[in-house]
Amino acid sequence: MTDANYNKQLVLVNAAIPLVWLGYDAFTGGLGANPIEFFLRATGVLGLIFLLITLSITPLRRLTGRNDLIKVRRSLGLIAFAYVCIHLTTYFVFDRGADLGSMLGDVAERPFITVGMAGFVMLVPLAVTSTNGMIKRLGGKRWQRLHRLIYLIAIAGVVHYYMLVKSDISYPLMFGAVLVLLLLSRAFLTRPGKPKSEARAVSIQ
Ligand code: HEM
């Protein structure tokens, strides 16, 4: 197995651990008094964490010069998508009784659901175009431009979180602070050997 494949599998196995743990707790009654709410919230937080880890790859590459990190970025983005899909499915099935009309009504009615759904809708084209074939079909530049949506998606995730908490806003603020740092690093960390303007022009990487 090549190093790149080994690293991807290592990322996938580690990313699956919280899900296996949640599944185990769900089956053994370890999710507390309100298991659905716990599961929904945990998968939301995991989706957001993996979005932020995906966004940290470019600054990490620029800081460390470890360009091979790029090879796990796509897996990380897809893991974020998978957690958000599980999050949305949990909400759809258990909160909305698998009723599409009820879900769409809720999307229209509750602003934090509208923002979460906007994040999900933007994630779909990124997941669909994550294959090598799609990168070729779209062309590198267009693909990169489309994949910059990930910043907007992470902002939607943090705003969604901020809007739904009732009293203690410290967690959404912490996620927001990490996101601001990642956005700033995009502006200030240039690629080694490249002028700043050029680095800005090319990169969702
Ligand atoms: C990018 C997409 C999304 C991200 C990153 C995300 C993230 C989160 C986070 C971090 C939480 C809070 C967890 C906590 O309280 O500890 C949450 C809760 C929640 N999310 Fe999402 N979410 C996303 C999309 C959605 C979508 C599409 C829906 C439904 C249409 C949704 C419905 C909910 C609900 C119902 C809750 C729980 C609210 C409550 O307990 O009062 N989310 N989400």
Image (tube, rainbow, N blue to C red):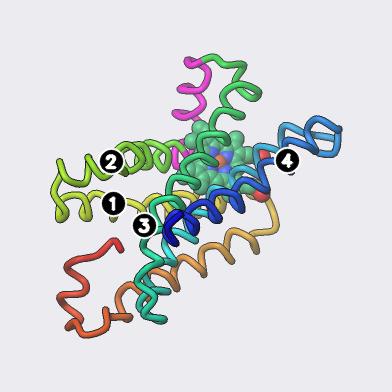
Q: Is residue 120 above or below residue 77?
A: above
At mark 3, the secondary structure is helix
Query: Would you name the residue on which mark 3 appears?
Result: 151
Q: CA distance from mark 1 to mark 2?
A: 9 Å
Q: Name the residue tied to disc 4.
A: 22
- State the residue in front, 129 or 35: 129
**Bounds of the magenta span?**
100-116
Residue extending farthest to the front is 1
* Residue sitting at x 44%, y 67%: 56
Mark 4 and 1 residues: CB-CB less than 8 Å, in contact? no
Marks 4/3: CA distance? 28 Å
Q: Earlier in the sequence, mark 4 or mark 2?
A: 4
The vertical placement of 118 against 99, above or below, is below
Q: Amino acid at mark 1?
A: His
> Percent x, y for residue 71?
38, 59
Mark 1 and mark 3: Cα distance apart in space: 9 Å
Contact (CB < 8 A) between labels 3 and 2?
Answer: no
- 90, 77: nearer the viewer: 77
Q: Please, what secondary structure does the residue beneath circle 2 have?
A: loop
Task: Determine the main secondary structure of the stretch shown in magenta.
Answer: helix
Q: Residues within 10 Å of mark 4 (few under 14, many from 20)?
A: some
Determine whether 120 is above or below 55 in the image. above
Residue behind mark 2? 129
Cβ–Cβ under 8 Å for marks 4 and 3? no
Q: In terms of image quadrants, where is residue 49? A: bottom right
Magenta stretch containing residue 105, yes or no?
A: yes
**Quick check: marks 1 and 2 in contact, CB under 8 Å?**
yes
Q: Residues within 10 Å of mark 3 (few under 14, many from 20)?
A: some
The amino acid on which the numbered mark 4 sits, given as a three-letter code, is Leu
